[in-house]
Image (cartoon, helix red, strand yellow):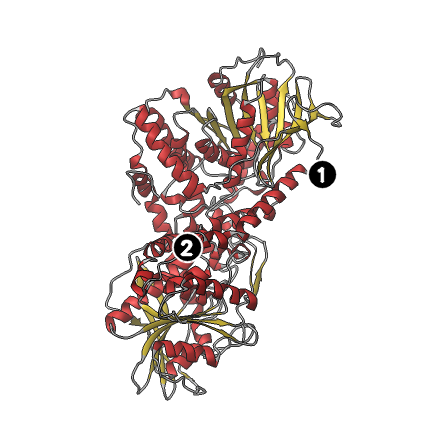
Amino acid sequence: MMPPGCRPAEGLLLPRLRRAGRCLLIFLVLGVAHAARLAAAAGPPSEPKVLVPTGPPLAGTAALTFEGDVASNLVAGVDRFLDRKLAAAAARRDRLGARNVGSVPEYEAGWADDRGRLAEMLGVVERRVVSSGWEWISSPAQPSLIATSAVVRVEAVRWPAFGDVTGEGLMLQPVGSRVVADVVAIPDADLTPEQWVGLEADGGNAAMAPVPLRLAESGCRVWVPFLINRNVGEAKVSWDEKRGRNLHHREYLHRAAFEMGRTLAGYEVLKVLALVDAVRREAPDRVVGVFGWGEGGRLALYAAALDPRLRVAGVSGYFGPREGVWEEPLDRNVFGLLERFGDAELAGMVAPRPLIIEAARGPEREFPSNGGAPGRLRTPELTAVRGEVNRARAIWRGLKPEPRLELIETDNGNGPAGSLAAMSAFLDGLSPGTRLAEGGVALRDLRQWSDPRGRADRQRHELDRHTQGLLADSARVRERFMKGLDVSNPERFQETQAAYRRFFDRDVMGKFDDARLPANARSRMSHEDERWRGFEVVLDVFPDVVAYGLLLLPKDLQEGERRPVVVCQHGLEGRPQHTIGKEGFDAYSAFSARLADRGFVVFAPQNLYLFRDRFRVLQRKANPMGRTLFSIITPQHQQIVDWLKTQPFVDASRIAFYGLSYGGKTAMRVPALVTDYCLSICSADFNEWVWKNTSTRSPYSYVWTGEYEIFEWNLGHTFNYAEMAALIAPRPFMVERGHFDGVAPDETVAYEFAKVRHFYAARLRRPAEDCRIEWFVGPHQIHGVGTYEFLHHHLKWPVPPGR
């Protein structure tokens, strides 16, 4: 649901900065040296003494007795919580309500809204090109006709799809017989059209019949589109040959598309539907069907679910439960899919049209976590396939006539795809009574020259250019999106801002509806400095989900005194202990300890972004449910703030947020939702975030790095950092920026901040001190000069003498 009136980090980055050549590296070194001089002048922060927790816990809390790594236990608990949510996804879908099975027209009409939702989830939203049809691909070196037999001609073809994007592949035309149907036969991503028709060896894929050739010999005109493959290391950029060397093509294209509300699968479904458009214009009365294997089976299922013009669908080596999609390659990540659609629900959308499921060997491949996301492709277990088929049949139970869903098992679900039984059933659905040809007629290869790498490059570059075009237009789309934010008076601003905040919470970050548990605070004293004491604190949030952090209490805190609080958030792979002066973590400048030295109460939470793949997999598990890491992080912070507000030493109206790096990423999202934070400071992260996540041209881009969890669904058309800041406003907001920070160049930081400053000053008429940026000569770190002044000013806390 859109808001009314609208239309449709990093970590401690120095060891892994995105360098734009040697010049930037020199700048970074100079920045580090300058920061070291500043630190030396200020005096080195001492590492607090760690105490054996033998003293009493914090007043009003139970004793924290947990032994071991609390942070590791926190991440493991969230993993269990998400596993339970995934396991219950099918049951949640079952509770969405029964389908109207009174009649076939009523049943079909009942899926109309779902088709729209599925199209949005996949990003099948582009307007398809209306054209005269396909064209033959030929050159002086190679005519379009590439193979022939006594009964079939095979030609290379291309057709316009959407924007400047085309589809390419092969067309198999029966010779000397009536065409009984048109079929789009979609191979797996790692199977070329030439391999599937039998012109080339299958490249190590499972042994299988040449399905397109068999159908063409039986009187079908067959179209075999090329899919983007999963080859690794070919998608490089000119300015850095190492970029992308461990990233397969499908993940590379999917990452940027995801940020723009698109998916690679959605792009390829659009190509299939554009081909159907062309075929239907040329032969409007001819039946059109779709059949696919592996990744092609996935696309065939999506296409048939979306487009009733596809009168028959066949899915081989793919159909089954999707609750384990987080283990599959990243390009199969569809945000929110499992809340509405499993394969059974997609089959329900195909009905009452015939659907042939072939339980056969599917593509099998491992993708290690080595630059790209870990993932694996496996043949669906036969028992799981049967279970999902039974779920599908239950959806339309009572519908007359009963839809045809045929499950064909080859060798207990592990035999070659394209079996005689599966092909015969599919052909019978297309043209009842038509017999499958016996096959065995060899194709004569007429190719004098071929360029498979050129075709792959063309298809990949077209999709890349399309996504980059969406990026170029995205600022204007976000402007239109935010038109409903009414600043004409404070009441209207608050009302309309709340609508955007709800949208950001539920549709962008994702929100679990679970009620939070009582905090049940446990604590133990863990650190002591001459000016403050530190306590580890654990709070319950959801079953198996806790919030954990360090609470620093100044020793001069008087009984009955209520002080302002600064919540200090660490960065990627960080811990609260790193923010109090732990050796080797100089980027934090011990800012938690330094702020406690100044008399603030400080709480340093443990965030989820720790243990590399362990936390990144949490994002993979959350995304198919329409959730993110911040679906957990936000309620953790709300629980922390709610608990802090009950403490006798806290002024509930003066709780501020200050985060570095990934903590700065948090500073843009959490205070936008947790309105109890009275201000927010984003350090070493603020930039043109959508550009950083989507550009395939910039050396600062995440498209090329190992942070595969960083991409957020459709952020490009909804909330960049300026729009997030509009949800923080009118509360004070500040950016802390080092000139040599490798997060982004100064100019993109300034560009995005200028939008925020304009909103505060020109639209809300807020004073200059409410929206600030501090530039300093230094790298990716806490500077602690202007930001400390900002905190003292807005939290109304005096600067201690000598500071």
Spot occupied by residue 693 in the image (x, y as percentages of width and height): 45, 45
Q: Is 539 on the left or on the right of 508, as rendered? A: right
Q: What type is the residue that disc 2 sits on?
A: Thr
Determine the residue positioned at 43% across, 65% down.
227
Mark 1 surroundings within 10 Å by alpha-carbon count, few (fewer than 14), some (14 through 19), many (20 or more): few
Mark 2 surroundings within 10 Å by alpha-carbon count, few (fewer than 14), some (14 through 19), many (20 or more): many
Spot occupied by residue 697 in the image (x, y as percentages of width and height): 42, 49
Determine the residue positioned at 38% across, 71% down.
354
Judge by depth and name the residue closer to the eye, 92 or 35. 92
Residue 675 in view of the camera: yes
Residue 236 in view of the camera: no
Which image quadrant is residue 4 in? top left
Determine the residue positioned at 40% across, 37% down.
502
Q: Is residue 720 above or below residue 338?
A: above
Residue 68's tag is: 1
Judge by depth and name the residue closer to the eye, 162 or 512. 512
Q: CA distance from mark 1 to mark 2?
A: 41 Å
Q: Earlier in the sequence, mark 1 or mark 2?
A: 1
Q: Is residue 1 above or below residue 168?
A: above
Spot occupied by residue 597 in the image (x, y as percentages of width and height): 61, 18
Judge by depth and name the residue closer to the eye, 487 or 13. 487
Q: What kind of element bears circle 1?
A: loop
Residue 263's tag is: 2
Spot occupied by residue 132 in the image (x, y as percentages of width and height): 23, 68
Q: What type is the residue that disc 1 sits on?
A: Gly
Q: Is residue 315 above or below residue 628?
A: below
